[in-house]
Every structure is written in structure tokens, then in C-alpha cells.
Image: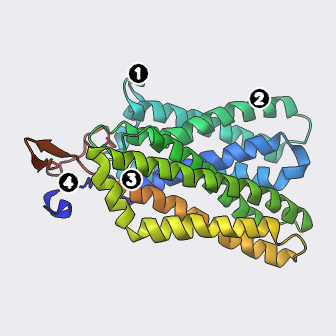
């Protein structure tokens, strides 16, 4: 049987949800880095400023993509109901609280004099970091709540998404630092960011390996694991161009460009960061499109579960595929 014909592959969550998951991750990751750097003071001032300007807007734009996928966006307020039993409701509250604190932090950082609100800023940064981490974990936990898709129902998925969020957060901050560079001080900050990004990319490679290995070992998710490894957007787009190339460029930036001119440093950082961001989006898209209903093995025969015909979405809007 061809899974593309018989409806085994899920079709309900596509590119719009991938963009939402990506923006939620990159916004939470960028804020986490900015919040941590805010405790370091002037030495990482530009990265802090850029990260704060990314956090709130990224979540806001991501929410727009989510609303466009709802069957009835006017009923979106219902998404926050029943947080005790619904991951969508929990995520709604987590993201909403994070957006409030990330916005407050941005306003205080940008429009108040240094030193006057240091204590309040540190408190807000601490709370914001907690909810930023919960936000980036939630983007993976949301998939894990989709019980009908074994490929997503893995404890490694939230770990992969959390590490990827920190990686893409680093890269988007670096991209902003290149665009709004302040000369030699920016080059030194990019050197620090490149080191952190390279370490996180290695962690992401390990997390992806564990995720695919675990998926392949389970009969229900093995087909999805094989499918994703045959997809060019995953192997070439994500693995080679989205992880391998940025890792190589970050290592070059750290080890081989100490005496290079500012233009060369900015160029390498820009290309590496751009490729890394592309990889983060392709990772989420690949995992979504390879999600499939399991094949049942009964009496030595294989039966594929067939997804039901597409129906109108419920009034509440976004629901996990099942």
C-alpha cells in the first residue's frame, strides 16, 4: 500500500503549524539567551537587546500563524479552558504569561535608565526565563500529546525541540547582531555566541540520533523513521545545510578568524546563522509531514489504519491529529 494514497500520513498539520512551532521555539530560545545575558551586564549588551526584541514579536507572529489554522479564530479564547486535561490549554496559558513578561522586560530594558530598575528587571528576567523554557518544551510536548501518531509520541521530541529552540535562538540573535553591529565589540560577542551555538548544535545532533534510533526500534514508528531519512529536506536541507554547515562555520569563526577583519567575521556569522535558522524550520516540517498512523500486525498480516476523511474543524480550532 502506498501511504500517500491510502491516507496513512497525517494531513491536518502542515507548514503553518511548522512555522508556529518554529517561531514559538526561536522566540523562547532567543529570550532565554537574552535573559541569561542580561545578568552579564555590558559585556553582552547587544546580544541581550537583540534577543529581547526577538522574543515577544516572534511569539506574536507565531500566534497569528496558529490563528490562521483555526477553524474558527473567534473561538480561540476557548483554547485556554481545561488546562488540567488539555495540553493546548496549558500551552495557551504558558505562552500568554511568557509574552507578558517578555514584553515587560523589553520595555524596561529599552525605555528606562540603567540601574534604576535593576532589581525589578532581574525578577522579571528570572520569571521570563522559566516561562520561555516552558514554551520551548511545550512545542514538543504538544506533538507528544497526539496519541494517534507514534512517531511524535516520544519523550525525546520535547528535548529535540528545546535544544533546537536554543540553537535557532542563538542564530537569530547572531543574525540581528550582524545587522546592527557596533564594530569590534560585536566581533568579540559573536565569538562567544559562536562557541555556545556550536556546543548546542552538537547536542542537537545527539538528540536527533537518539530520537531516530528510538523511533526505529518501535514497530509503530519505524516507517516514519525510515520515511524521514529518505526525505531530501531532512537529509540535505536540515542535516547537512541546517546543522553540518552552521557547525563548521561556527567552529571556523571561533578558531580561525581571531585576526580577521570585521567584514569577514560578520559574513561568516551571517551565513552560518541563516543556514541554522533554515534548518530549524525544516526539522519541524520534516517531523510533521512524516507523522503517520501505525501499521497493525494481526495474525502475521499487516493492516494500515486509514485516517478518516477530512471534516470541518471543531469550533475550538486547532486539535492534535488522531
What whole-number distance in Å separates the C-alpha atoms at marks 2 and 1? 27 Å
* 169 vs 174: above or below: above
Mark 4 vs mark 2: give the one in front.
4
Res. 184 in view: yes
219 sits to left or right of 35: left
Q: How many residues crowd around disc 3 within 10 Å: few (fewer than 14), some, or many (20 or more)? A: some
In the rendered image, the quadrant that contains the N terminus is bottom left
Q: Which numbered disc flags the more N-terminal residue, 1 or 4?
A: 4
Mark 4 or 3: in front is 4
| Front disc: 3 or 2 | 2
The tag on residue 68 is: 3
- Residue found farthest to the front: 300
Report the number of discs: 4
Spatial CA span between label 3 and label 2: 34 Å
User: Could you say which disc has been placed on residue 8 in the image?
Assistant: 4
Counting residues from the start of the chain, the first of labels 1 and 3 encountered is: 3
Q: Is residue 240 above or below residue 104?
A: below
**Tag 3 and tag 2, C-beta contact below 8 Å:** no
Question: N-terminal of the two: label 4 or label 2?
Answer: 4
Quickly name the residue at label 1.
84
Reading the image, the residue beneath label 2 is 123
Occupied quadrant, residue 247: bottom right
Q: Is 218 placed above or below 81 here? A: below
**Display coloring:** rainbow
The residue mark sitting in front, 1 or 3, is: 1
Up/down of 7 relative to 244, above or below: above
Q: Residues within 10 Å of mark 4 (few under 14, many from 20)?
A: many
- C-alpha distance separating marks 1 and 3: 26 Å
Amino acid at each position: 500500500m502506498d501511504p500517500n494514497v491510502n491516507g496513512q500520513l497525517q494531513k491536518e498539520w502542515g507548514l503553518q503549524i511548522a512555522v508556529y512551532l518554529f517561531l514559538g521555539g526561536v522566540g523562547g530560545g532567543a529570550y532565554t539567551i537574552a535573559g541569561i545575558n542580561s545578568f552579564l551586564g555590558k559585556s553582552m549588551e547587544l546580544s541581550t537587546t537583540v534577543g529581547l526584541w526577538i522574543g515577544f514579536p516572534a511569539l506574536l507572529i507565531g500566534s497569528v500563524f496558529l490563528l490562521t489554522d483555526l477553524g474558527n479564530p473567534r473561538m480561540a479564547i476557548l483554547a485556554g479552558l481545561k488546562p488540567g486535561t488539555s495540553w493546548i490549554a496549558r500551552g495557551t496559558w504558558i505562552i500568554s504569561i511568557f509574552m507578558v513578561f517578555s514584553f515587560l522586560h523589553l520595555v524596561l530594558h529599552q525605555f528606562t535608565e540603567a540601574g534604576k530598575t535593576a532589581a525589578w528587571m532581574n525578577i522579571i528576567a528570572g520569571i521570563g526565563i522559566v516561562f520561555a523554557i516552558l514554551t520551548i518544551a511545550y512545542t514538543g510536548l504538544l506533538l507528544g500529546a497526539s496519541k494517534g501518531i507514534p512517531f511524535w509520541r516520544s519523550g525525546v521530541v520535547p528535548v529535540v525541540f528545546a535544544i533546537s529552540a536554543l540553537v535557532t535562538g542563538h542564530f537569530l540573535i547572531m543574525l540581528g547582531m550582524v545587522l546592527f553591529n557596533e564594530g569590534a565589540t560585536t566581533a568579540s560577542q559573536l565569538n562567544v555566541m559562536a562557541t555556545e551555538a556550536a556546543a548546542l548544535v552538537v547536542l542537537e545532533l545527539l538528540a536527533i540520533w537518539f530520537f531516530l534510533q528510538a523511533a526505529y526500534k518501535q514497530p509503530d514508528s519505524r516507517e516514519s523513521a525510515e520515511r524521514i531519512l529518505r526525505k531530501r529536506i531532512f537529509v540535505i536541507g536540515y542535516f547537512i545545510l541546517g546543522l553540518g554547515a552552521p557547525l563548521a562555520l561556527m567552529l571556523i569563526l571561533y578558531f580561525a578568524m581571531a585576526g580577521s577583519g570585521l567584514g569577514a567575521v560578520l559574513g561568516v556569522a551571517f551565513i552560518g546563522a541563516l543556514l541554522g535558522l533554515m534548518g530549524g524550520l525544516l526539522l519541524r516540517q520534516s517531523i510533521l509531514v512524516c507523522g503517520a498512523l501505525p501499521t497493525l500486525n494481526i495474525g502475521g498480516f499487516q493492516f494500515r489504519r486509514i485516517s478518516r476523511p477530512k471534516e470541518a474543524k471543531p469550533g475550538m480550532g486547532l486539535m492534535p491529529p488522531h
